């Protein structure tokens, strides 16, 4: 086991094959639609099917947490009509899918500054989160009006408030405590970040959480993302050697030790 900032990273091959926490930057909806001579918003609507497919696969293979970047804090600057369609879609999906999520034991969580949304949408989000709060098979995190820098500032503010209230002292602040205050504090550490659409950047997503994540980039445009593409990303993750700052030799030695211990137990 390698311990980073209070979190344990198992180097056990069998356990590490399936990532515990996967995040996806769902990019390429607009281009997908434009390639078909349609409006960009057509691509966002088609993107909902890819969301469904990825949630289904995540639950099937035993991923514990799936975080999807649905709307960034910068997306407000898009044309008004496109922002309107994205809001409508979010609202529609909440209405049509929450029952199914609940039946499938999936917990829904929204991360981001939802105070900027229409009050009705905020209520829908809170209701959906409350309804699914006890579900265990998968946590589906929707990042909405989310930014990685916002997440870090929000955590800092909440910690500073506790220091001000004397609930915490300055010496209590370490990586583990900070990690508990970011929006994903109750979730496993991020293992795999996938970005569709061909660009190779993080776009202000999960900046704190990316520290030791593996990155997987694909040219596939989000509406074409399906079980096959998701499986390729998971298979690629399974063959990577995660070193967490150690050398390859140290990791191999740890794996040998783990295997020997397993043999003794057997
Ligand atoms: C990026 O593609 C995609 C988005 C900004 C929105 C993602 C939304 C969905 C997939 C549908 C709704 C999802 C949920 C969870 C309710 P882009 O528009 O930047 O594509 P481009 O790079 O081709 O322009």
Image (cartoon, rainbow, N blue to C red):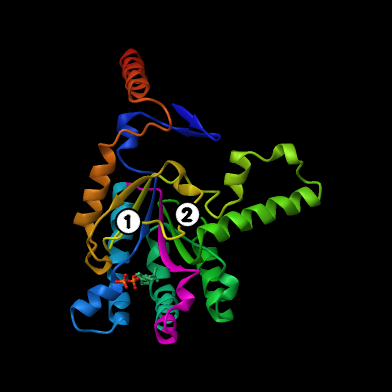
Quadrant of ligand 1: it is: bottom left
How far apart marks 2 and 1 lie (CA) works out to 15 Å
Give the residue displayed 77% in from the left and 48% down from the top.
163
* Image spot of residue 12 (x, y percent): 35, 28
Nearer mark to the viewer, of 2 and 1: 1
Judged from the image, the secondary structure of the residue bearing numbered disc 1 is: loop
Q: Which image quadrant is residue 114 in?
A: bottom right
Work out whether residue 197 or residue 49 is closer to the camera in this orientation and state it. 197
* Image spot of residue 99 (x, y percent): 41, 69
Against 124, residue 4 (above or below) is above
Give the residue displayed 51% in from the left and 49% down from the top.
208
Q: Quadrant of the N terminus?
A: top left
Give the residue displayed 43% in from the left and 79% down from the top.
78
Work out whether residue 125 or residue 89 is closer to the camera in this orientation and state it. 89
* Image spot of residue 33 (x, y percent): 24, 78
Q: Residue furthest top?
A: 264
2 and 1 marks in contact (CB < 8 Å): no
| Of the image marks 2 and 1, the number of the one nearer the N terminus | 1
Query: Where does the magenta region start and end?
Result: 62-84
Instruction: Report the residue marked by disc 2.
Output: 206
Q: Which mark is residue 200?
A: 1
Judged from the image, the secondary structure of the residue bearing numbered disc 2 is: loop
Against 63, residue 72 (above or below) is below
Against 200, residue 260 (above or below) is above
Mark 2, other Cα within 10 Å: few <14 / some 14–19 / many ≥20: many
Q: Is residue 66 magenta?
A: yes
């Amino acid at each position: 086991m390698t311990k980073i900032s209070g979190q344990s990273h198992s180097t056990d091959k069998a356990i590490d094959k399936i990532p515990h926490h996967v995040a996806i930057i769902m990019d390429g909806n607009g281009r997908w639609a434009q390639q078909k001579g349609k409006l960009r918003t057509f691509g966002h609507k088609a993107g909902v099917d890819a969301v469904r497919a990825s949630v289904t696969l995540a639950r099937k293979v035993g991923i514990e947490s799936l975080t999807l970047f649905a709307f960034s804090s910068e997306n407000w600057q898009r044309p008004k009509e496109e922002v309107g369609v994205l809001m409508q879609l979010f609202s529609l999906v909440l209405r049509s899918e929450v029952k199914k999520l609940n039946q499938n034991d999936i917990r829904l969580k929204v991360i981001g500054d939802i105070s900027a949304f229409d009050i009705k949408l905020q209520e829908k989000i809170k209701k959906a989160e409350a309804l699914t709060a006890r579900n265990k098979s998968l946590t589906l995190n929707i990042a909405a009006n989310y930014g990685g820098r916002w997440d870090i500032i929000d955590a800092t503010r909440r910690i500073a408030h506790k220091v001000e209230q004397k609930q915490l002292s300055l010496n209590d602040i370490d990586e583990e405590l900070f990690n508990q205050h970011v929006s994903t504090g109750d979730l496993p550490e991020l293992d795999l970040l996938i970005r569709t659409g061909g660009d190779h950047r993080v776009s202000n997503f999960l900046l704190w959480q990316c520290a030791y994540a593996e990155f997987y980039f694909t040219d596939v445009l989000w509406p074409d993302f399906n079980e096959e593409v998701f499986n390729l990303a998971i298979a690629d993750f399974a063959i990577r050697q995660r070193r967490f700052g150690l050398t390859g030799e140290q990791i191999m030695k740890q794996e040998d030790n783990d295997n020997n211990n397993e043999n003794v137990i057997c």
